[in-house]
Image (cartoon, rainbow, N blue to C red):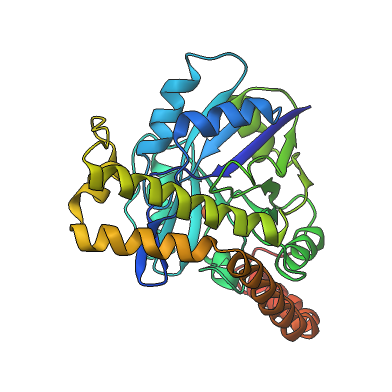
Amino acid sequence: MGRADTHLHTEYSGYSNLGVMKFPESVTTPAQQVDKGIKNGMDVIAITDHDETRGAFEAQKYAKTVEGIEVIAGEEITTADGEIIGLFLTEKVPAGLPVEETADIVKEQGGLLIVPHPFSFHVFALREKMFDVDFDGFETINGGHPDKYTNMFARMVMDRYPGKWAETASSDAHSLYTSGTCWTEFEGTTAEEFRKAILSRTTKACGKPASVFSQVQWSMNVAFGGQKLLYKSLRGTLEQKEDDHLVEKIESINRLKKATGMVAATAYAVPPIPFLATTLSVIYLHRGAKRLIPEIPQRLEGIDEILRSKGKLR
Ligand SMILES: [Fe+2]
């Protein structure tokens, strides 16, 4: 059986807010993510940056120079209705469109449609809107969801309609700390065999989400990584790699903002802050799950109803 981790991010993944500063979501390079995939024992990985495919194509090119891994070009596309993943893409899919239109573009490219963390309550998930498109599979385990609700509910939906969709598990890693915690098992070892396994609904979701603490490690990794780049930029020693969008972005901000960013990153890494961040996240996730779990039976019936009305349930 082969292993595939098909939801991974790199430094091309865009920005998130950290206090007053915008920090990159990831400071991991495509090559680093490929090397980690090999170390993790993956036969296949997919780079699925937010609304971007540059990192995916770069990783694909790099993987050809090393042994033992294949890279699928993917994208985690922010549609108007929630996030969806396109795999086996040949070009970037535009963000912000209705999910139906996005699905058509992915299919026109011969791609597969996978719904990431479909029932998440803490990221922009498609939820029941997913049933408006003919997706191929969804994540029953997403490594970025250590809460007690999201993955459990996805598993219940998958088990309710056996053989209807393919199950996947992905680490959704934005750093090397969390890469490889989850993977999809499939018959074979190549990307093409992975595609076949998805289409024949024979995949198996394996692994478990990364701990909340390792998610905080990722944010510290981003803070320190960002800080290092800001420092180099202030000193004028930041290497200008051709077409490196992280470097471009860092160079474009003014000196005051660079200095403020460095202070913010340092404050973030002072001992009580990461632990406080971990504790607060655990409390938030626990509360969300506690609120949503009682609604599960009703929500499952609602899904039956949606599928029946679309003629997708016999
Ligand atoms: Fe993601």
Q: Quadrant of residue 67?
A: top right
Q: Position of residue 232 (x, y in %)?
A: 30, 42
Q: Nearer the viewer, residue 13 or 242?
A: 242
Q: Nearer the viewer, residue 161 or 182?
A: 182
Who's the residue at 28% across and 37% down the image?
Answer: 244
Q: Position of residue 193 (x, y in %)?
A: 65, 26
Q: Position of residue 80 (x, y in %)?
A: 39, 68
Residue 97 appears in the picture as rendered: no
Q: Quadrant of residue 89?
A: top left
Residue 125 left/right relative to 237 = right
In the rendered view, tell whether residue 314 sits above or below residue 242. below
Who's the residue at 68% across and 40% down the image?
Answer: 180
State how many labels appear. Answer: 0
Who's the residue at 78% across and 46% down the image?
Answer: 207
In the rendered view, tell whether residue 144 sits above or below residue 88. below
Q: Position of residue 215 (x, y in %)?
A: 62, 57
In the rendered view, tell whether residue 113 sits above or below residue 19. above
**Looking at the rendering, in which quadrant would you find the N terminus?**
top right
**Looking at the rendering, in which quadrant would you find the C terminus?**
bottom right
Residue 233 left/right relative to 160 = left
Residue 127 appears in the picture as rendered: yes
Residue 109 left/right relative to 282 = left
